[in-house]
Image (cartoon, helix red, strand yellow):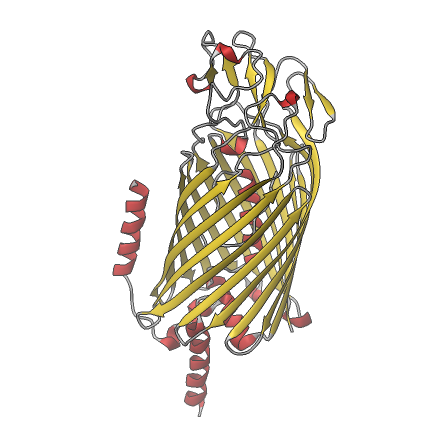
Amino acid sequence: MAATRTIAHALSVASCALLSLSADSIAGVDILPAEVSVSAMIYVEENRVIVNEDVVQIKKELDEENLLTGKLIFDVMSGPSPSGAPVSSKMQTMTSPSGNQKIIPPGEEPTYSFRDTRNAILVDWESQTSRLTKWIHSASLSAEFDYYSTGISSTYSRDINNRLTTITSGLGLTYDYITPVGGTPEGLTLTRADSNIGEKTKYDIEWMIGVTQIINRHSLLQLNYTTGSANGYLSDPYKIIAVTDDVTGDPYDYYADKRPDSRTSNILFANYLLDMKGDALNLSYRYFSDSWKVSSHTYDVKYKLQLKNKKEFQIHFRYYDQTAASFYHYAFVDGAASDVAKENDIISSDAKGAQRIDGLVDYASADRRLANINTYTVGVQYSWQASFKYAKINLRLDHFRQTDKDKRLTELRGWVAQLAARFQF
Amino acid sequence: MRFFILLLSFFLASCSLITPVKPWERDVLARENMQLNADELVLLMDEQIYYSKEASHGGRGVGGGGCGCN
């Protein structure tokens, strides 16, 4: 009798695992008729942006084959964001997108202050179409004051090789509508000319194929390849680039950011999970490269320590390293007389006093996100279970530092604190 | 390219270590801390944060919703 019970228990565990490698599916089909998760996050940058983001997620099993997941996301973002203009030894007068003038003291990084909210809804419908196959269809809608985004995607997965291997393929489409505060400036024209080329749109298409392989009883490996193409308005209407004097190095004019209107990207992603006597080691690596000549490596390590009474403690380390986009410039340097400017940053002296510089360069951006940067992140997470509705609670704290490898931008330091709880009903 | 080759080599090497796992031996892989998308709301937040601070994004899958992300 005891042996029968043991086998029955083993089969029950196995049937859960066989349904999918996904925790969602395991939870959705056999364990949880409904699951509610809530999360509150605060993201703080030193002297810059603060973001508060709250999420409510509900997973509801429709029947044994279908699981519906809905997420509501509420963001509030505010604070100073870098404009792209360089630090100057002189006072700078800048105009914010909303038309207000701001005086930037000497030696201070020019920023503009903003406040925005974002509300988003994401819905996933997961359907187990046969014992070995599964579809996930998703739709998303996101609204900010100046940015609207809609997206749909479908992902198909099939288990093969005695369910040791899962092949996954997905297609995603996104359409964005952009209505910048103060209008959309024409790229590479003087910001004080106050140009406006109206509302803009952007389309994204992404396709991925992946394989997840169970290596042995204690480890598995996932490998994904994704290719994407974005088309439309890909510039940042709030970023500017300065032309500086080749002798003093001080900026004397500012032009609107202009990026190519298409961008193709290729991504390789690998994720390895290893059981270490109850603890879990999670290693991931991502290689990204795109037609803007950005290439990056992301290494992520998480070690989750299993403590007594279902408590967990996780240590997290992430390292990110990227090369600059081909059209990234810290600032343009007028003329070739400067011996301190990078060759890539030198622009013809015809730029002096020019209303527009699109006859001199095709594209230009001083957005630090396109610079030669790296990011270090360290974090900890503590999880525990509460008796109410089988609650699992997570508290995590991450700290990151982003550094310009060319040592021209100020270091960006940020903190992320997040409290999340999951309840089963 | 060399990273791709390295990655592919790692994958093939791992495949050579594959030991068949019977259905009743999947208790470890069914554990919550052995799921690829464990702590999904943490992953969701992280993807959005780094999307707004770095030039690269994605890799885990498709979809998820866009943002202006200043």
Front residue of A213/A4: it is A213
Give the quarter of the image for residue A265.
top left
Q: Position of residue A299 (x, y in %)?
A: 43, 45
Position of residue A196 in the picture relative to residue A263 (left or right)? right
Count of numbered circles in the view = 0
Farthest residue toward the left? B16
Front residue of A157/A425: it is A157
Q: Position of residue A291 (x, y in %)?
A: 40, 37
Above or below — where is A77 with respect to B17?
Answer: above
The quadrant of the picture occupied by the C terminus of chain A is bottom right
- What residue lies at 68% left-to-right and 35% top-to-bottom? A181
- What residue lies at 62% left-to-right and 28% top-to-bottom? A83
Give the quarter of the image for residue B39.
bottom right
Farthest residue toward the front? A197
- What residue lies at 42% left-to-right and 67% top-to-bottom? B29
The quadrant of the picture occupied by the N terminus of chain A is bottom left
Farthest residue toward the right? A100
The answer, for residue A309, to whether it is visible in the render is no
Q: Position of residue A318 (x, y in %)?
A: 48, 44
The answer, for residue A18, to whether it is visible in the render is yes
Q: Position of residue A112 (x, y in %)?
A: 67, 29
- What residue lies at 29% left-to-right and 46% top-to-bottom? B6
Front residue of A268/A316: it is A268
Position of residue A340 in the picture relative to residue A55 (left or right)? left
